[in-house]
Each structure stands twice: as C-alpha cells, then as structure tokens.
Image: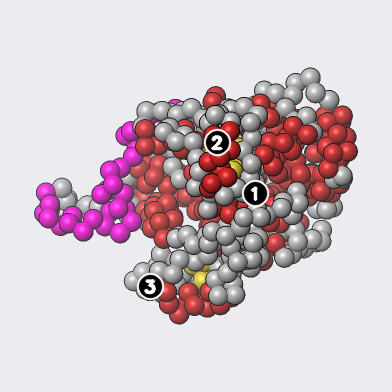
Amino acid sequence: MKSLTKYIVIPCALALSVVGCAKFEDFGDTNISPNATELASTQALLTNALLSVGSYSSETRGGLYAQHFSETQYTETSLYQAPVLDFTALYYGPIADLEKIIAFCSDPVTAPRTAAYGLPQNQIAISRIVKAFYYWAATDKWGDLPYTEALKAPSIMYPKYDTPEAIYKGVMQELTEAVDQLDLSANNVTGDVIAEGSSQAASWARFANSLRMVIALRTSNVYPGASEWGAVEFKKAFEHSRGYIATNAQNFNQKYDGDVVAYGNPWWSLFRTRSDYAVSDVFGEALVDVGDPRVSVVGSNTTFFPYGLTRNDAVTFTSTVGGVYSVIWAPAYRQQSSTVPILTASQVALTIAEAASLGWVSADATTWLKNGVTLGWSQYSVGGSLDVDDYLADVTAETGYTGAALIQYQQWFSWYGNGLQAWSNWRRTRVPNLIPSPNALSASGQIPERYQYPTTELNFNEENARLAFAKYNDNSPDVKLWWAK
C-alpha cells in the first residue's frame, strides 16, 4: 500500500473542498490560471472521503448497544444517556467530497483533466458506491434525513428530510447502477486507500453487490415475501455476474499503512493512551459458553468486563482485577497498520443463509450457515480442527436457537467490531435477547432504537427538522426505525 501522506490534504484544503477557507482570498491570484478552470485533485478528495469508512465500521456506540463492548470508566453511553449526535460533518465532509468527484468527472470541461487520477467513469462509480454506503449508515442511525435535496445550495437552502424507505431505495438504485458502470479492465483510480491494485474495479463491484444483499435483508420485516422488494433486490445482487465477497481473500478492508499517526487503525488510536472500552461479559461469555474459537481473537484475555455498570461499580471492578481486563481485540488486530473489516465473506455468507431460509434465493440455508461460520473462523486462523456440525449443535443446545434465529445468532458473532452493523442487525432481529442495563439513565430504560437529531437543526432547517422530530415522537430515541418494526 502506498503511503497516505501525499493523498491527505491539509485542513484548509479539505475545508476548501467543502465550504471554502474564509481567508483564501487573502492570497490573491498568485496560483490562479486565467485560462483554466480551477479543479481540486479528485485523488485527494477520494482519499479524504474513504478515510472515514473504517471509522464507520468500528464504531463503539453501536457495539455498546449490541453489548459487544463495555465501558470501563465513563459509562454513560452504555447506560443509554440521550444519543444526541450531529450529522453535519458527514454531509460537509465525505459526502461533499464524493459529490465533487462525481461533478468534476461528469463535466465535459473538467473530466479530461480528472483522467490524471484514473478513468473518470470508475471514479464516478466508486464515489457513488461510497456515497450510498454513507447514506445507508446514516439513515440507520437517525431515520429520516436530507437526501434528494441535500447539498444543493444555493438552489435549495432548506432540504427536506426523506423517509428511510426512500433513502434505502435510492441507495439501492445507486449501488445497482454503479456496479454496472465500473469498467473492470481499468484499475488505475488513485487515492483509493481500500481497494487499490490490479483487481480494484472488481473488488468495488463485489463490495457493492454484497452491500446490496445486506441492505435488502435489513428490510426483511417490512418485505418478507419472496416476490417483494427486499427479495427481488437481494436476488439481483446474488445472481449478478460480477459476484460478491465469497472468500476471505476478497474481504473488503480499510487499510492503514502506519505512516500517518492521525490515520492509524481506529482501535490502535483508541487504546494508545487509554483503555476505556473492553469486551463485555455478555459477548465474551457467549463465545465461551459455545466453545467458539474466536474468543482468543476478540479481546486481549478472558477477563471480560461486566456490562452496564455505574461508574463507581466499574472503577471497583477495575480495581478488583488489578486493571487487567479484556481490551477490545487481541493485540495483533489493533496495531497501527492493522486493517479494519468493512464487509467480510463470513458476514455475506450468513446474509445469504438467512435469505435462503426466507425462500428469497434457491440455496441451502444450512450449507451457507456452516460456510459463514467456518469463514469467520478462518478469517482469524482459528477453529481449524473444530467440527462445524458439532459446534452448531452445541450452540443450539446452549441457546435453544434453531433455523433463522441460529443464523442470526451467528450474525451477532460475525459483526463483532462493527458496532453500527451489530446494533442495526440486532434491532432488526432481536437476536440474542439482550437485557438492558438495570442502571439505565434513559427514561424508558431501554436500549436506544435510533440516534436523536441535534437541536441545531432547528436553527438551520427548522420547518423540515420539526416535521422529522414529530415523526419520531418529538425526537425520541425509543422509536423503532421502519425496518425494525
């Protein structure tokens, strides 16, 4: 992997790509050519847009809600303190950068110049895939969000909030078109810190098709039938000639080369000077109870941290174990240059297994379940001598789960580390039966169902924000999202 240093723009340059540096005019026209249209480097824009993908795939908040993790000192998040979070940085950071790439590469005037950074057609397709990923992740956090009218100032200053269902269908269309738009013979898009190399375009196509299947399955409660939207879209992706992530060699990972401290592996960054998060006893003991070999990978030891403690009780537990508890991931998986899985063959196989159990595709659910489990083990080089049939029999004996619930329990294991997806999949399936912390700070005492909109939206987009607030019972974190009902 090439060093990121030359791809990362300085803060002012990044701001310029979004909203402009306030004092840029102070530099006069020294570097402005009167005979050329000014054009930002699409290479730098792509790198900036991609650097957050790994962070979106390693969020701690969702991991706390899914009870994969525990907080060891400041326990408010795992006690469900109001999850009021802002989405502005997503829009005016990565999504704005991606929109600029698409605009520059689509404009007949500027497109020839963007070719210096790779085939414009593929730059557009990759940008569309990443933009779809971000919008999907965002709507699964908040619900209704600006989408069709987002980032269209000055023509639209107050964008409407689209429904999550509309965003889902828009994202699915974007991904579907982007897969076919990719030229698989061109693998020269620079600034790509995820899938560079000779199979760059094919890797993005597999990722997009795999994402389409995960997104479609997320709607299984709304569209359960084999002839309904979810199944139809799933089958299109499953049968697409450009394939999906099927082997661990094809896993879609965020790469970190270790040259830039500010952009090291998020887990490495998180634990550089502190250890505020640990493997929860709920998750760690679930692995131990069924003899899952991934227990040696998910944490630094098997002293799991009790979930949902008050700060005082957390401090007491830390003292009791001498400050030695299971930090998230074994050391080998949280080095500065360690990769972060965005989507893996195991996760895709378990997605196919559940779709098969629903009758969405002609495939054997049990075969795909076993495939998903063994891929999950081999991803971390564990479980080589373990018989998967015996293992699954032990899981059923321990949990009582069979059929789709057994698949969903394995999905809970498989999404470890990816907090947002673990939480989202749990909200859809309610597997396993997670018990909220008895020390909850929220009025309902329940695990949050969504993030709350920031009140600043009332200052900048009041009319549309109030409509969204009202839709979610005055911006409550307890209202289920459309696909969770």
Residue 234 in sight: no
In this picture, is 467 found above or below 240? below
Kind of residue at disc 2: Thr
Q: Is residue 19 magenta?
A: yes
Q: Secondary structure at mark 2?
A: helix
Q: Which residue does the numbered mark 3 point to in the structure image?
A: 460
- Depth check, mark 1 against mark 2: the one in front is 2
Q: Residue 139's quadrant in the figure?
A: bottom right
**Disc 3/disc 1 C-alpha distance (Å):** 33 Å
Front in this rendered view, residue 298 or 11: 298
Range drawn in magenta:
1-30
Q: Secondary structure at mark 3?
A: helix
In the rendered view, does 457 fall on the left or right side of 185? left
Name the spot of residue 30 as percent of width and height, x first.
11, 49
Q: Which residue does the numbered mark 1 point to in the structure image?
A: 66
Residue at 40 percent of width and 37 percent of height: 263
Q: Residue 96's quadrant in the figure?
A: bottom left
Q: Which residue does the numbered mark 2 point to in the structure image?
A: 318
Kind of residue at disc 1: Ala
Residue at 62 percent of width and 27 percent of height: 301
Name the spot of residue 461 as percent of width and height, x first.
41, 74
- Depth check, mark 3 against mark 1: the one in front is 1
